[in-house]
Image (spheres, rainbow, N blue to C red):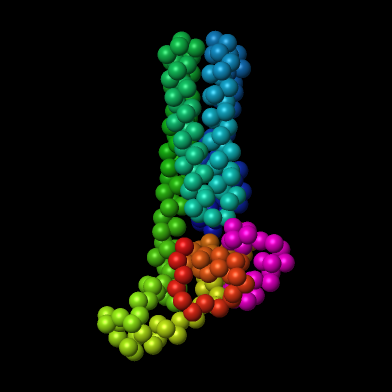
């Protein structure tokens, strides 16, 4: 996701979704600053909180290195758009908002929501594509041996499995471990700082085991 977003946006401020959320938040602050709506403080606070939450979650999603997290934050942002729309209906029904202001704000909330949805599905597609391109050596099914279903020649090849690095980042575990220990990194921090475990994700269980045991060479398939 990061690379795809970077192609169009260097910072979260460049994202159309964030810019639209900002516009919506500004309009919400203006409409709640005076007039009849401003008399209902609780409703104003809810509207303001929900609209700024859209901006904050889009920004946080962008800043997170992992697609899974980004997807999650975009879902929260989209949920906040729905909150804003709901509170706008409350304000309209209570007679605190005139129809023109309501239509304008609802339109902004809807277009922000659609942009976030498009961004979120782009992130999901990219995540799925990376999973499909999983490297072969880490993608073997768990070996049931002895098994009549596995020809002995294949078994010999599978049994000599040796996993020693993150294939996507071409990073040997033996290089990564001292670095991780020196920096006191957790698994999440390894993924953020080095990208290991954050592409196809298949080396993640090995990274976890490496941190737990100090092992840098594996001869069996591990699963999360
Ligand atoms: S092997 Fe793909 S992320 Fe490490």
Q: Please name whichever residue, 15 or 192, is drawn nearer the observer in this view of the structure.
A: 192
Q: Is residue 19 above or below residue 143?
A: above
Q: Residue at x 43, y 69 (%)?
A: 134
Badge count: 0
Q: Is residue 76 visible?
A: yes
Residue 149 location, x and y as percent?
A: 27, 80
Q: Is residue 25 visible?
A: no
Quarter holding residue 208: bottom right
Find the residue positioned furthest to the left: 148
Residue 171 location, x and y as percent?
A: 59, 73
Q: Residue at x 54, y 55 (%)?
A: 66
Q: Is residue 175 above or below residue 2?
A: below
Q: Please name whichever residue, 76 or 153, is drawn nearer the observer in this view of the structure.
A: 153
Whether the magenta-drawn stretch holds residue 173 is answered as yes
Find the residue positioned furthest to the bottom: 153
Residue 140 location, x and y as percent?
A: 39, 74
Residue 59 location, x and y as percent?
A: 58, 43
Give the prevailing secondary structure in the magenta stretch: helix
Whether the magenta-drawn stretch holds residue 174 is answered as yes
Q: Please name whichever residue, 3 or 60, is drawn nearer the observer in this view of the structure.
A: 60
Find the residue positioned furthest to the right: 182
Q: Report the span colored magenta.
A: 170-191
Whether residue 83 sits left or right of residue 42 in the image: it is left
Q: Residue at x 39, y 88 (%)?
A: 156
Q: Is residue 144 above or below residue 56?
A: below
Quarter holding residue 182: bottom right
Find the residue positioned furthest to the front: 146
């Amino acid at each position: 996701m990061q690379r795809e977003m970077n192609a169009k946006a260097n910072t979260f401020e460049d994202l159309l979704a964030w810019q639209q959320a900002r516009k919506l938040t500004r309009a919400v602050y203006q409409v709640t600053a005076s007039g009849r709506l401003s008399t209902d403080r609780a409703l104003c606070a809810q509207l303001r909180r929900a609209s700024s939450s859209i901006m904050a979650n889009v920004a946080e999603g962008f800043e997170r290195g992992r697609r899974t997290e980004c997807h999650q934050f975009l879902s929260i942002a989209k949920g906040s758009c729905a909150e804003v729309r709901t509170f706008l209906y409350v304000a309209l029904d209570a007679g605190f908002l005139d129809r023109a202001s309501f239509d304008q704000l609802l339109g902004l909330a809807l277009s922000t929501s659609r942009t976030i949805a498009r961004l979120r599905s782009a992130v999901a597609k990219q995540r799925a594509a990376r999973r499909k391109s999983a490297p072969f050596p880490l993608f073997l099914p768990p070996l049931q041996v002895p098994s009549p279903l596995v020809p002995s020649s294949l078994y010999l090849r599978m049994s000599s499995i040796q996993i020693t690095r993150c294939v996507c980042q071409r990073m040997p575990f033996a290089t990564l471990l001292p670095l991780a220990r020196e920096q006191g990194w957790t698994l999440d921090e390894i993924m953020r700082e080095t990208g290991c475990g954050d592409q196809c994700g298949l080396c993640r269980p090995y990274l976890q085991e490496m941190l737990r045991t100090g092992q840098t060479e594996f001869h069996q398939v591990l699963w999360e």
